[in-house]
Image (tube, rainbow, N blue to C red):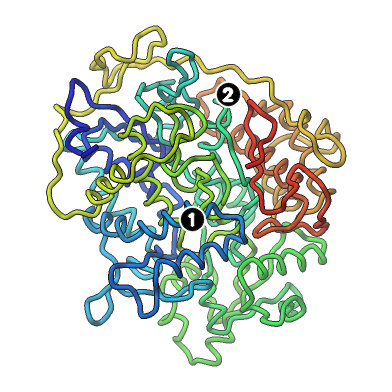
Amino acid sequence: MTTASVAEGSAPKRLIVVGSGIAGLYSALLAAEAGAEVVLLTKGALADSNTYYAQGGISAVLDEPAPGDTVAAHIADTLKAGAGHCNEEAVRVLCTEARLDIAGLGRFGVQFDLDDDGDPALGLEAAHSAPRILHAGGDATGAGVAAALIRTVLDFQAAGRIQVIGHAQVTSLSLGGPHGGRVVGANFLHDGRHLGVHGDSVLLATGGAGQLFAQTTNPAVATADGLALAWRVGAAVADLEFFQFHPTCMVLPAAAREAEGNNDPLLISEAVRGEGAILVDATGLRFMPDYHPDAELAPRDVVSRSIALHLAKLGDPNGHVFLDATVIEEQRGQGFLAKRFPTLSKRTRQAGVDWTRQLVPVAPAAHYWMGGVVTDLYGRTSVPGLLAAGEVACTGVQGANRLASNSLLEGLVFGRRAVEGFLGGSSTGPLAPALEPRTGDRLASSAAGSGAHATTALSGPPELPFVDSGRPLSGPPAPLLGSVLEMDPVPGPASWEFESLPGPGALETSFGQAGAFSRGALRRLMTAKAGVLRDGGLLREAGAALAAWAGDVLPLNVPDSLDVREHEDANLLLAAQLLVHAARERRESLGAHYRNDSVREPAAVEDFDKRYTMSRKASLVHD
């Protein structure tokens, strides 16, 4: 299928994209260029996403790579970081097609940093065997990429090719079709009203769930919305036990964290420790040499675990330690920190800390969720009409531990492939075999091409169809922009309960000491009992407390409320229950999932490197 052919025929297909990170923005642009009607829903402003906060770059082996670098080497590095748990075919796709989507970003206005010769400046990061990291604006790659894509999306909106609806909290997915099992639209809150929109498919690009934990590098919008939406309509999820923590995120004052979430997280890069900064506790003790011979230069997950172990030993699992960068200034001379780390120097100063003279409070922070909604290599989930891409999806490409700078790349490659799956219109059902290679090749080439695309512009902005469950989807959309749109009936909860699933230890039933539910209490619970350090006892306690709260919050249901926060709370609680259950079932440590009581006993995951998959329709599935 060519991009021109999509626009031919009686009516273009409509794609509803939920989320405005790199996967959502890029896929919306590609779908619109291919002639589809695109409605882009974002819960805040377009810039409110994990992408915007990404300091790292995008990994790719270009047509002219660094000396000695190859696609095979990128594949090998990714598989090694994933601890033997990756989907090897997904990794091959990611690394092989990376250069096409890097070129696609350039066509949409993204400018990567260049070296003195005018070539792409390729950086080297931990666990990469060769320099292959592209940056835009130094340590602000995410912001640079997001800004360029947002400008292009707004241009498309002005031209009537994309309809953007900001501050739209999607609350549920609409089901329809001959047997009522296909996703045909999305319902959302906007300006104090319940609204809805129909489409041929919905693409979830909602990002992660860092707000599950007391400390996170994610912005306040990262509340597991996409995972909850997918789960409630029966989509399969997998690998939820694998959550990556960054070891050194600046700790904000407690009042600010409780009141607003982590709206402006500040990650302190490993490069600071590479220059000589050390970690000390509240007594001034440098503790890392007691945990690893490489001390502060140990791998990211080791440093995170060491900090967590030390805090647990001190009896303060939700506490923090300190990063001492004053030693760098003493050794390298006055002004070195400001010159070497200008952004971090400015940001720490804005937070009230002069790190040339003062210690910076830091703690491990939830950074990236490797698990998510299960998809095939074209973004198709186990529910017809529902696609997913980016951090919300689980392609298997990240395995048990993500390789640095592969996350933005995954959003690009599999966001494009989700559009290919949508445009291909395969009728072979969920998790269908991959489309014919030439279909994907053509869209990939279009993404990377520099010429004009053969598309048919829409006549005016795409109009939101009136949501009426009795109306055939094939009918013409009514011009109701600016009118009240009614919300579709929400599917009732399936008869799925956490207590019905097998698991070691006590069942997750009522827990008298859980106390009243609050988001702060949830974050503290998850950090202390299901964070960097886990064991069976802690996870059972977490499951019991979550089950007690679920009796009041009812996370399987869609809240009957116009309060966005109530919907986010239900989504977070549901995600927490799913994560804790998956962590209990995987009883051996693997990758980012670390258990102090790691054993090789028969459990739900009998082979330690096998994927643990759950859905509301079936208790568990082994791949």
Q: Tell which of 477 and 320 is nearer to you.
A: 477
Please, is residue 382 above or below residue 180 in the view?
A: below
Q: Residue at x 51, y 68 (%)?
A: 77
Query: In the rendered structure, which amino acid carries the disc numbered 1?
Result: Asp
Q: Residue at x 44, y 86 (%)?
A: 335
Q: In the picture, residue 190 is in which quadrant?
A: top left
Residue 484 placement, left or right of 369? left
Question: Measured from the top left, where is residue 355 in percent x and y?
Answer: 54, 77
Is residue 258 visible from the viewing direction of this image? yes
Query: Would you name the residue on which mark 2 appears?
Result: 559
Q: Residue at x 70, y 31 (%)?
A: 619
Q: Tell which of 90 and 191 is nearer to you.
A: 90
Question: Measured from the top left, where is residue 386 in percent x and y?
Answer: 45, 31
Q: Residue at x 22, y 77 (%)?
A: 118
**The C terminus: image quadrant:** top right
**Please, what secondary structure does the residue beneath circle 1 have?**
loop
Return the residue found at the far top.
470
Q: In the picture, residue 109 is in which quadrant?
A: bottom left
Q: Tell which of 483 and 368 is nearer to you.
A: 368
Is residue 216 visible from the viewing direction of this image? no
Which label belongs to residue 264? 1
Please, is residue 33 above or below residue 148 in the view?
A: above
Query: In the rendered structure, which amino acid carries the disc numbered 2?
Result: Pro
Q: In the picture, residue 463 is in which quadrant?
A: top left
Mark 2–mark 1 Cα distance, whole angstroms, equals 28 Å
**The N terminus: image quadrant:** top left
**Please, what secondary structure does the residue beneath circle 2 have?**
loop
Question: Measured from the top left, where is residue 232 in percent x and y?
Answer: 57, 27
Counting residues from the N terminus, which is met first, the one under dot 2 or under dot 1? 1
Question: Measured from the top left, where is residue 251 in percent x and y?
Answer: 60, 62
